[in-house]
Amino acid sequence: MSNSVGVVATKRAVFEMPLRFRSGAVLPRYELVYETYGTLNADRSNAILICHALSGHHHVAGYYSDAPNNIGWWDNMVGPGKPINTDKFYVIGLNNLGGCHGSTGPSSINPETGLPYGSSFPVITVEDWVESQARLASELGIDCFAAVVGGSLGGMQALQWSLAYPERVRHVLAIASAPRLTAQNIAFNDVARNAILTDPDFHGGDFYLHGVVPTRGLRLARMLGHITYLSDDAMADKFGRELRTGQYNYGYEVEFQIESYLRYQGDKFAAYFDANTYLLMTKALDYFDPAQDYEGDLNKAFARARANFLVISFTTDWRFSPQRSREIVRPLLHNHRNVSYAEITSNHGHDSFLMDDSQYMDVVRAYLANIRCGVKV
């Protein structure tokens, strides 16, 4: 495959040191799965961490030998000669704690009970994720990342890196993200969670023990979320008011192509994603607010940051609008940080950060090309 990192393999790190969550809960032992692309240089100065969004995972680029069609979710961005150039950088993608793709999460077996964690898995925050990621970096011998990169919820993690470990990250790329959610965004998340929580097959989060999956709730949650990821223009261009059969059926079954698309996306998602993980991820989104401990003042919150920043937004992204990205830029400028900001014209809505848009790709490529790595003389 052209400019691909090629065949990749999943790696696993085991941590025996307990992790105390922001909530006060403690996880005595946990595992993180991750993948790496490229080569770590002699002074370990060329590492980039990719932080994933709500439904993302560690498989960022390349493909598996036994599943060549399973291409990484950001393969258009990461690889030889691509914007995140693996000829230059050593790139790490991981599945966050609480995930459902191999890292310890609600569906994992609790060694103390021999049963899935289920409802007993602690509510997790962006701060908790960054702490676990920092432990992985130490395990890999990486004292400082050349950059931490993320879109959406991943962008929040990248921002938190600059605040929790200002000495361990030189550049932050926050794409289609926000310093905290608006009330509207929290409302969307609450409706999605309630679709899951009220599914009879959810069983309070312990559905594993009943041999069922809250498919209906997870399906509805994904359908709602997917609506917010697309722009009105993107929906109009792709589906318009097209009917599946060319005529009205005067009933409640699928008639419009957009209905068919949303149900397909909901069914596909419910078949592989864990409902408890969905709840955890959306709550982490809701809770993230660096200014909470500073009386709501983002200027004070970002005073700890020492990194250089690239902040990118997209014109039709109404879930994480350009205004939200400018709310990141302003306190950074107030604190005299080096900040580059790009507002990309795109009709793909929030999903724009995943798309193969030349202007967007060129901005990321140009920024990362100026990062110096190598043995210091």
Image (cartoon, grey):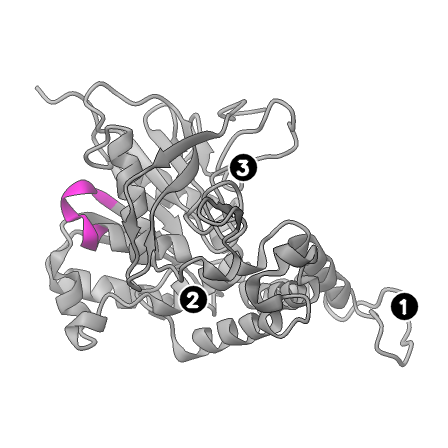
Residue 218 visible to an observer of this rendering:
yes
Give the mark nearest the N terminus, 1 or 2: 1
Q: Secondary structure at mark 2?
A: helix
Residue in the image at 91% along x and 73% along y:
247
- Within 10 Å of disc 2 (Cα), the crowding (few <14, some 14-19, many 20+) is some
Overall secondary structure of the magenta stretch? helix
Pointer 3 residue: 72
Residue 107 among magenta residues = no
Q: Secondary structure at mark 3?
A: loop
Tell which of 59 and 26 is nearer to you. Answer: 26
Pointer 1 residue: 246
Residue in the image at 15% along x and 54% along y:
305
Figure check: 32 above or below 203 = above
Which x, y percent locates residue 210? 68, 58
Which x, y percent locates residue 122? 40, 59
Pointer 2 residue: 283
Figure check: 320 above or below 158 = below
Q: Secondary structure at mark 1?
A: loop
Q: Are marks 1 and 3 in contact (CB under 8 Å)?
A: no
Observer-side mark, 1 or 3, equals 3
